[in-house]
């Protein structure tokens, strides 16, 4: 069993670190708000550091799951950051959803210290993290991946190497681009069903057996039909992710008209006070605009 550090005990990181501990690893956690680190240690055991450097010292595997590019730079390169304490041969596995650029930048910085980097964003949401069944999309060197995979498996059901550093983040961008279009389509379908006087539940029961079926349909139609959005994957996070994908598209020359449009719809939902609402709240925007 390995010496592991976990930096960032948010909605995702808290249960992910818990699974690493339950797997038998020696886990040291760090969280900016110390109370959360104390709560984690009370619940699972292990220990916490009061800086990212302190948590990462002597660790063979260091996981990070913070908010965005700047947060990641701060916990890795900032004062008392991971890089100041990382040991030769250690692997930093970043589970934050970030740009591919920051992944490449950190990979180079760590290489100079004799350490390695994997970008390893996740999909599967809070429930996937709590149940230890996340999908992990990884970018990095094959031999680094092979060493880290058995440890990552503590909280994942599917963990695949997608290519060189940055490829995990690029794959996650594809994931978010696909979700944006699917959720808007589902919202329009349910909105139309209500306008047509149909029983939404019965409609989904039937059409989910056919070609319109999707994860969003199965897992979100009930709350969308009931107008409940105060849970799940926050719009603020989705707009960060779509922003990253749209930036990357400008660089690689792809056209993402639907993702760009849905991003604007999300900005309208933020204007309705929905910053922390689940991404399925695109339906709320349509219902508000009902004639
Ligand atoms: P969250 O609950 O908001 O937690 C964010 C964590 O990062 C907290 O522990 C926070 O510390 C820490 N943090 C943020 N900025 C920091 C900084 N500058 N320095 C140190 N620590 C910092 O977020 P989450 O839902 O766990 O999401 C984390 C990442 O996973 C995001 O990139 C998100 O896009 C991605 N993701 C989320 C989901 C989901 O369903 N939630 C699904 C897939 C991927 P404090 O406790 O002190 O605030």
Image: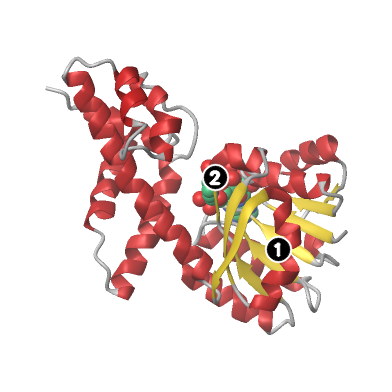
The front one of 144 and 55 is 144
Name the residue: 59% across, 36% down: 127
The residue carrying mark 1 is 149
> Mark 2 touching mark 1, by CB under 8 A?
no
Q: Secondary structure at mark 2?
A: loop
Name the residue: 80% across, 79% down: 88
Q: Residues within 10 Å of mark 2 (few under 14, many from 20)?
A: some
Q: Earlier in the sequence, mark 2 or mark 1?
A: 2
Residue 24 visible in the current orientation: yes
Asked if the beta carbon under badge 2 is closer than 8 A to the nearest atom of ligand 1, the reply is yes
Name the image quarter holding the N terminus: bottom right
* Vertical placement of residue 5 versus 45, above or below: below
Q: Residues within 10 Å of mark 1 (few under 14, many from 20)?
A: some
Name the residue: 81% across, 74% down: 87
When asked about the image quadrant of residue 290, the answer is: top left
- Residue 124 is marked as 2
* Vertical placement of residue 208 versus 237, above or below: above
Residue 291 in the image, given as x and y percentages of width and height: 11, 22
Q: Secondary structure at mark 1?
A: helix
Q: Seen from this angle, which residue lies furthest front? A: 210
Task: Judge left or right: residue 148 versus residue 186.
Answer: right
Q: Seen from this angle, which residue lies furthest bottom? A: 112
- Residue 51 is marked as none
Residue 247 in the image, given as x and y percentages of width and height: 34, 66
* Vertical placement of residue 114 versus 1, above or below: below
Residue 232 in the image, given as x and y percentages of width and height: 49, 35
Residue 78 visible in the current orientation: no
Name the residue: 29% across, 53% down: 259
Instruction: Find the distance from the CA under tag 2 to the CA under tag 1.
Output: 18 Å
């Amino acid at each position: 069993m390995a010496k592991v550090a976990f930096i960032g005990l948010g909605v995702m990181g808290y249960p992910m670190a818990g699974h690493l501990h339950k797997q038998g690893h020696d886990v040291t956690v760090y969280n900016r708000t110390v109370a959360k680190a104390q709560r984690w240690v009370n619940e699972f055991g292990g220990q916490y550091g009061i800086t990212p450097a302190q948590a990462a010292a002597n660790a063979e595997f260091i996981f990070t799951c913070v908010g965005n590019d700047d947060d990641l730079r701060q916990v890795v390169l900032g004062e008392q950051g991971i890089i100041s304490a990382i040991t030769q041969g250690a692997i930093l596995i970043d589970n934050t959803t970030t740009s591919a650029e920051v992944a490449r930048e950190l990979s180079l910085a760590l290489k100079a210290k004799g350490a390695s980097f994997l970008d390893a964003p996740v999909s599967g949401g809070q429930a996937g993290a709590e149940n230890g069944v996340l999908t992990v999309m990884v970018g990095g060197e094959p031999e680094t991946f092979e060493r880290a995979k058995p440890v990552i498996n503590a909280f994942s059901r599917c963990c695949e190497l997608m290519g060189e550093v940055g490829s995990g983040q690029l794959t996650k961008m594809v994931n978010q681009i696909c979700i944006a279009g699917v959720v808007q389509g589902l919202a329009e379908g349910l909105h139309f069903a209500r306008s047509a006087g149909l029983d939404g539940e019965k409609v989904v029961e039937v059409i989910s057996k056919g070609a319109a079926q999707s994860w969003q349909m199965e897992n979100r139609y009930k709350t969308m039909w009931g107008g409940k959005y105060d849970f799940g994957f926050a719009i603020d996070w989705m707009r960060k992710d779509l922003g990253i994908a749209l930036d990357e598209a400008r660089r690689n020359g792809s056209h993402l008209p639907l993702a760009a449009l849905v991003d604007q719809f999300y900005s309208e939902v933020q204007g309705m006070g929905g910053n922390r609402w689940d991404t399925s709240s695109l339906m709320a925007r349509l219902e508000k605009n009902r004639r």
